[in-house]
Amino acid sequence: MRMRNPKDKDLTIASCDFFYTAEGFANSNPIHIEIGMGKGQFILAMALKYPQLNFIGVEKYSSVAALAIKKIAPYQLPNLKILIMDAIDLATVLDHQVSCLYLNFSDPWPKKRHAKRRLTSPLYLASYDKLFKDEKVIYQKTDNMALFQYSLASLEDYGYTIKELSYDLLASEDSLAMSEYEEKFRHQGIKIKYLKAVKKHD
């Protein structure tokens, strides 16, 4: 997700007091992360809905992260932190600490030569191995059928088992929160594709 830099981006980021650091959380609850948190709606809603879990929103682009910071800051939640970095480098700060990973409406990178940039490519799946503490659990939602089919094949080839699958996830069936994109696509009548993939600890 790319956008123009907000005029107060640097000040917003500098004033943020809930970046994830080596100190971690003040408890030992499971850590769930969202890669590509966008404006933060999903990760904020999840942290509010599940206070017994810890959440980290990861965003590569500081311009987008600044918007998420503005949305999250008023709540001062003890179980929600953020990181501004490329997902491929997450193991440098979250080495074998993560219990669950969410991929919501990720960039599909439709051109074949860009396939390795997809967040369910073997390159990224290998990097996630270093994040997970025990059993590996990945949730994905997308509006893009080509990306979804690619993800199914990539995950299964990598040793994941697809535990839950829907090509038209109804809001009434969804125990997860909705991101800004999901609300937009549902309003437009676009079907939401969903999976839960699990891989036993190596």
Image (cartoon, rainbow, N blue to C red):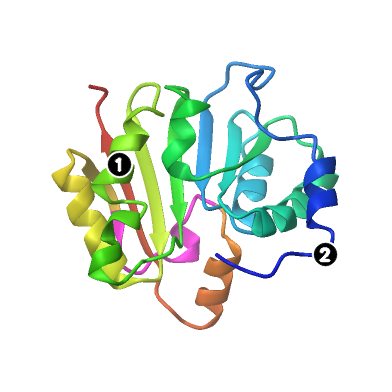
Residue 172 forms part of the magenta stretch: yes
Residue 32: mark in rendering: none
Q: What kind of residue is marked 2?
A: Lys
Residue placed under numbered mark 2 in the picture: 7
Q: Is residue 119 above or below residue 49?
A: below
Q: Residues within 10 Å of mark 2 (few under 14, many from 20)?
A: few
**Which circle, 2 or 1, is nearer the viewer?**
2
Residue 15 forms part of the magenta stretch: no
Residue placed under numbered mark 1 in the picture: 125
* Gap between marks 2 and 1 measured at Cα: 35 Å
Residue at x 52% of width, y 53% of height: 36
Residue at x 73% of width, y 54% of height: 66
Residue found farthest to the bottom: 188
Mark 2 in CB contact with mark 1 (< 8 angstroms):
no
> Which part of the image, by quadrant, shows the C terminus?
top left
Residue 197 image point, x, y percent: 29, 44
Q: What kind of residue is marked 1?
A: Leu
- The secondary structure type at the circle numbered 1 is helix
Residue 189 image point, x, y percent: 47, 82
> Which part of the image, by quadrant, shows the N terminus?
bottom right
Residue stretch rendered in magenta on the structure: 165-176
Between residue 170 and residue 126, name the one nearer to us: 126
Between residue 169 and residue 125, name the one nearer to us: 125
Residue 126 image point, x, y percent: 28, 37
Residue 145 image point, x, y percent: 30, 71
